[in-house]
Image: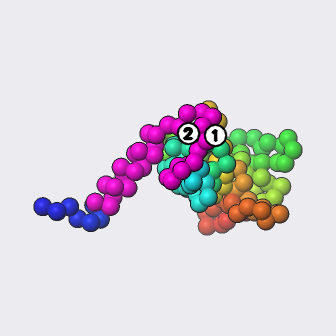
Amino acid sequence: MKPAPKLFAALVALAVSAYLGLTQIPSGEPLSGAGSIASASKSAVTSHDIAAAYLAKANDVDVSGAGTVTRILADDIDGSRHQRFILDVQAERTILIAHNIDLAPRIEDLKVGDTVEFKGVYEWNDRGGVVHWTHHDPQRRRPGGWLKYRGRTYQ
């Protein structure tokens, strides 16, 4: 019996995702080549791929996705002010969102358990990573990021 085309495509996608999620690039190695996180930084990768970015200790990677707020932190007021909160983006994978509130509006009434969509730039750290640049670029040198919450876009 032949597998259905949709099932075959889903299995191929699952295999590629598993490979990317399990492939580790040694620290300090340049991330280049087809299918790498560096190549993906030119177009946003999904929150599923944040696991691969974390394992690769990648920086400056455009990402997008959604997650559930697990913790709301105090604003960072050193230099540019940032609203900070932790998102669970997949099973046992959390990221810190650092949203510049000097350039974009604050998300008011954000609560633990809420869902937030995001587009920004991923930077590795040993706690899961940080997503920043969740706002427009006032100098228009890079694509803008955003947060989406309860039908409103914050950029």
Q: Which residue is mark 2?
A: 56
Q: Is residue 84 visible in the rendered structure shown here?
A: yes
Q: Determine if residue 70 is in view.
A: no
Contact (CB < 8 A) between labels 2 and 1? yes
Q: Pointer 2: residues within 10 angstroms few (<14), some, or many (20+)? A: many
Which residue is drawn at the image coordinates 54% and 50% (left, top)? 33
- Residue 153 falls inside the magenta stretch: no
Q: Which residues are magenta?
A: 8-37
Label 2 sits on what residue type? Ala
- The count of marks equals 2
Name the front one of labels 2 and 1.
Answer: 2
User: Where does the image place residue 78, in percent across and percent down from the top left?
Assistant: 85, 41
Q: Secondary structure at mark 1?
A: loop
Tell me which residue sits at (29%, 65%) in the image.
Answer: 6
Quadrant where the image shows the C terminus: bottom right
- Asked whether, in this view, residue 35 is left or right of residue 128, the answer is left
In whole angstroms, how far apart are the C-alphas of marks 2 and 1?
9 Å
Please tell me which of labels 2 and 1 falls first in the chain.
2
Residue hosting label 1: 124
- For badge 1, the amino acid type reads Trp
In the shown orientation, is residue 13 left or right of residue 128? Answer: left
Please report the residue visible at 57 percent of the width from the left and 54 percent of the height from the top: 39
Q: Position of residue 10 (x, y in %)?
A: 33, 58
